[in-house]
Amino acid sequence: MNLSSTSQKFQDQLNKLCPNLKVVEYSQGARTAEDAAKAIGCEVGQIAKSLVFKGTNTGRPYLFIVSGPNRLNEQKMTDIVGEEIEKADADFVKEKTGFSIGGIPPFAHLQKLDTYLDKDLLKYDFVWAAAGTPQAVFKIKPADLMLYTKADLIKTD
């Protein structure tokens, strides 16, 4: 299967880390966790959303990998990261990760991001995460996701 250039770029990174992980592209976009779960045929909770925020004082990028149905409590995350945060705009996200909103994978970014993983993702044998575009995903064990992201575990709400 031929992947889009952006998804292929991410697949190339996967090949270096874990060659058995494969990017899958769907013809319809999956911009929401519900859309992705429906396209894949999994529970919404198995969708690992990558949300990028920006520290309001430092400009530092923060990545929160959140289970599909969960919402991120920004005040709680502010307490965790030690500074006020705001949702990052599209240009900031692209500059820091190399990917556009809607297709941000949980790792293989242009810059290192302080990363936090929702504990609820650990309930599943496998989760699905974006792989560079809204049409591309890959399946990964939560333990491997922790390993590759070097994320701190959090409760998002």
Image (cartoon, rainbow, N blue to C red):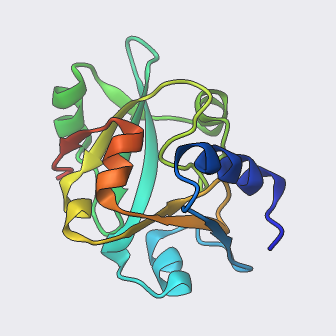
Vertical side of 120 occupied by 132: above or below: above
Q: Residue at x 43, y 57 (%)?
A: 49
Instruction: Identify whether 86 is placed above or below 39.
Output: above
Q: In this view, does 45 lie to the left or right of 51?
A: left
Quick check: 97 above or below 117? above
- Residue 99: quadrant of the picture: top right
Identified at 37% across, 51% down, the residue is 145
Provide residue 130's location: percent of width, then percent of height: 55, 59
- In terms of depth relative to the viewer, which is nearer, 22 or 45? 22
* In the image: residue 80, left or right of residue 103: left
What residue do we see at 34% from left, 28% from top? 85
Q: x, y (%) of residue 105?
A: 54, 50
Image coordinates for residue 72, horizontal then vertical, percent: 28, 50
Residue 78 location (% of width, % of height): 23, 29
Residue at the image position 29 percent from the left and 46 percent from the top = 117
Image quadrant for the N terminus?
bottom right
